[in-house]
Image (cartoon, rainbow, N blue to C red):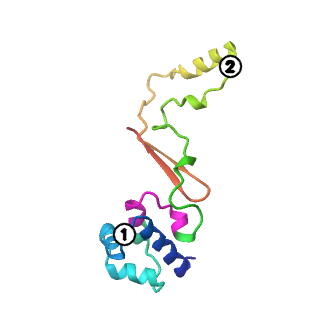
Amino acid sequence: MINNSDFAKRLKKVLDYYQLSASAFAEKIQVQRSSISHLLSGRNKPSLDFVLKVLEHFKDVELYWLLNGKGSFPKDTKKETFPSTLFSENPNTKPANIDSEKKNQIKKEQKFEFPNSNVNHNKIDKIVIFYKNGTFKQYNEM
């Protein structure tokens, strides 16, 4: 359950981080100024619509951090070690020493072709990874 006063403190931290007044913040996410006032005072709890608008407009805000203070703000982008696309080759993931037998095995695996020519060869549109802490990362084909 969301603690109103703690949520208000985290919302204030977001406002301070982006150097926005409550009015400017409300305008940016397209909600009424009174909604922000009620949330900052602890009078109201945030609606799902409000939370989704915050996450949509402010990419450094993590869902779990905003709702219950778990995680970090702003998002720690240094933890991400993925290449720009999931399918790009990342030189950091190559093993340092591989014998020639292993190299041949890897090449065979990389060149696998479906034996049945009727297999549907659809391209991947997006991949979504769900983490145990409730966050997720979405990768779209570029």
Residue 120: percent from the left, percent from the top?
43, 31
* Label 2 sits on residue: 98
**In whole angstroms, how far apart are the C-alphas of marks 1 and 2?**
53 Å
Q: Secondary structure at mark 1?
A: loop
Q: Would residue 84 appear left or right of 25 to someone viewing this image?
A: right
In the rendered structure, which disc, 1 or 2, sits on the residue that comes first in sequence? 1
Q: Amino acid at mark 1?
A: Leu
Which-is-in-front pick, marks 1 and 2? 1
- Determine whether 33 is above or below 127 in the image: below
Q: Predominant secondary structure in magenta?
A: helix
* Label 1 sits on residue: 20
Q: Quadrant of the C terminus?
A: top left
Residue 16: percent from the left, percent from the top?
44, 69
The residue shown at (54%, 53%) is 76
Viewer-side residue, 83 vs 13: 13
Residue 52: percent from the left, percent from the top?
41, 65
The residue shown at (51%, 68%) is 66
Q: Secondary structure at mark 2?
A: loop
Q: Which residues are magenta?
A: 53-66
